[in-house]
Image (cartoon, rainbow, N blue to C red):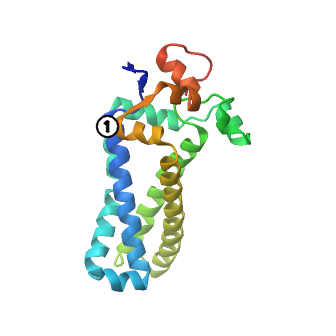
Amino acid sequence: MSAPEGDLDRFSLPVRWVHGLTGLFMIVCILTAAVLYNGSLAVLVGHRYLVEQTHLWSGLALPVPLLAGIASRSYRDDAGRLNRFTSRDWAWLRSRTRRDGRIEVGKFNAGQKLNASLSAGSIGVLLLSGSVMYLTRLTPLAWRSGATFVHDWFALAVGLLVVGHIGMALRDPDALTGIRTGRVPLRWARREHAAWAREVTGEVSGETR
């Protein structure tokens, strides 16, 4: 699995496509929501109906890449890793010096696993609450009021989560290169994901998930 010149294959093409499309739809949802909820932006942008439709269809499209990715074995493998917390993950979360490399983690650290879980769960909540809000003729007013409250607060939380995710990525050029090209430097892998690096290079030791 190792690539030339000291690089390692980290993300397959299907995984990168799923990540990219999901991120694109999410950003479109956040930007259109900002226009819909901010009067000044709404006046500046105009075309409210077009913004509403873009928000609606981008929201409906959010789970599509995640579901389509199931056809890829590499995607299913990464999803399985993200869905599993090990003893090292709990130790990593409790540690105040978690990024110094002394706690060796697998392909994903606990922070990345939490981000994936929160993102996936939030997409489900936003899709369900948004559907209740949209289907005005099929749902009672009390349901729509509750759904609006949930949708608004989850949207705010997801927006903050996405901003934090992008900020973390911009601070780590090697990680950003990994999700863009699929490959990362071996030196970076050994520093940030030592257990996974040993797994890929054949030096398996302990937990590698």
Q: Position of residue 46 (x, y in %)?
A: 29, 83
Q: Nearer the viewer, residue 173 or 181?
A: 173
Q: Position of residue 127 (x, y in %)?
A: 41, 62
Q: Describe residue 179's horizontal placement relative to residue 113 as left or right.
A: left
Q: Position of residue 30 (x, y in %)?
A: 41, 66
Q: Nearer the viewer, residue 49 or 31?
A: 31
Q: Nearer the viewer, residue 154 or 5?
A: 5
Task: Give the residue number, with chain letter if any, for mark 1.
Answer: 14
- Residue sitting at x 56%, y 35%: 84
Residue type at mark 1 is Pro
- Residue sitting at x 57%, y 32%: 192
101 lies above or below 115:
above
Q: Quadrant of residue 43?
A: bottom left
45 lies above or below 77:
below
- Residue sitting at x 35%, y 29%: 73
- Residue sitting at x 25%, y 75%: 50
Quadrant containing the C terminus is top right
Count of labels in the image: 1
180 lies above or below 49:
above
Q: Position of residue 100 (x, y in %)?
A: 67, 34
Instruction: Say which element carries label 1.
Output: helix
**Neighbour class for label 1 at 10 Å: few (<14), some, many (≥20)?**
some
Q: Quadrant of residue 131?
A: bottom left
* Residue found farthest to the top: 202
Visible residue check, residue 75: yes
Visible residue check, residue 131: no
Quadrant containing the N terminus is top left
